[in-house]
Image: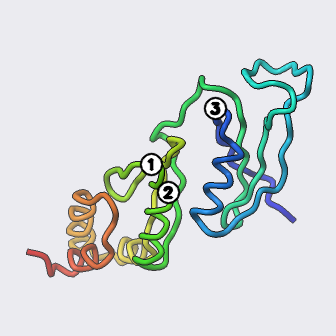
Amino acid sequence: MTTPIATCLWFDGQAEEAAQFYISALGEGSIDSITPYPQDSPFPSPFPGGYPMLVEFTLMGQRFQGLNGGPMFPFTEAVSISVTCKDQSELDRRYDALTADGGAPGPCGWLKDRFGLSWQLVPEELIALQKSGNAAGITRMSAALMQMQRLDIAALRAAFEGKVE
């Protein structure tokens, strides 16, 4: 049984391309269905009948919908997709994949992909350290994190432990 909730992402005609890109970048997912615009579409759309209207896809077990709605609603940093990464190797692989071909790094481990969607790649260890209750360590680690683009797990751990000059 699939979950009854899905995140809908608005694209300007690239929903299928984006779904394929995300599946490739994250290494786990599928395109589940593609619904075309009707030939005599009642929807205000810049796309002709037969063009993909809704692309339903799954990433890492999470349902998404890519809606080709047109240029009027671009992505902003107000919404991002957060992906937990088990180690530096996984974080680096996903970071490189998501910033490829026109994506861009952002502050504190955030990035934008080539479609303008914001992502957060969060190491499992960062989550564990944040939940440790060690206020001084969390403060040091947070200060280090604020200086980074791509997160460096070893540097975050060192800051948490107070082993940074």
Which of the 4 image quarters holds residue 14?
top right
What secondary structure is found at the residue carrying circle 1?
Answer: loop
Look at mark 3 in the image and give the residue it sits on: 12
> Considering depth in this image, is 141 or 149 the residue closer to the camera?
149
Tell me the distance, in whole angstroms, between the alpha carbons under discs 2 and 3.
19 Å
| Residue type, numbered disc 1 | Gly
Residue beneath the point at 50% across and 45% down: 114
Residue, x 25% and y 57% (percent of image)? Answer: 146
Q: Residue at x 44, y 66 (%)?
A: 122
The reply to whether callout 2 and callout 1 are in contact (CB within 8 Å) is yes
- Residue 131: x and y, percent? 40, 73
> Residue 65, percent across and down?
73, 46
Three-letter code for the amino acid on which mark 3 is drawn: Asp
Q: Closer to the N terminus: mark 3 or mark 1?
A: 3
User: Local crowd at mark 2 within 10 Å, few (<14), some, or many (≥20)?
Assistant: many
Q: Nearer the viewer, residue 163 or 70?
A: 70
Q: Residue at x 49, y 49 (%)?
A: 113
Amino acid type, mark 2? Leu
x and y, in percent, of residue 125 in the image: 40, 78
Picture quarter with the C terminus: bottom left
* Residue placed under numbered mark 1 in the picture: 103
Disc 2 on helix, strand or loop? Answer: helix
Asked which quadrant contains residue 59, the reply is bottom right
Res. 98 mark: 2
Measure how far apart labels 3 and 1 are at the Cα level.
16 Å
Q: CA distance from mark 2 to mark 1?
A: 7 Å
Q: Position of residue 49 (x, y in %)?
A: 86, 26
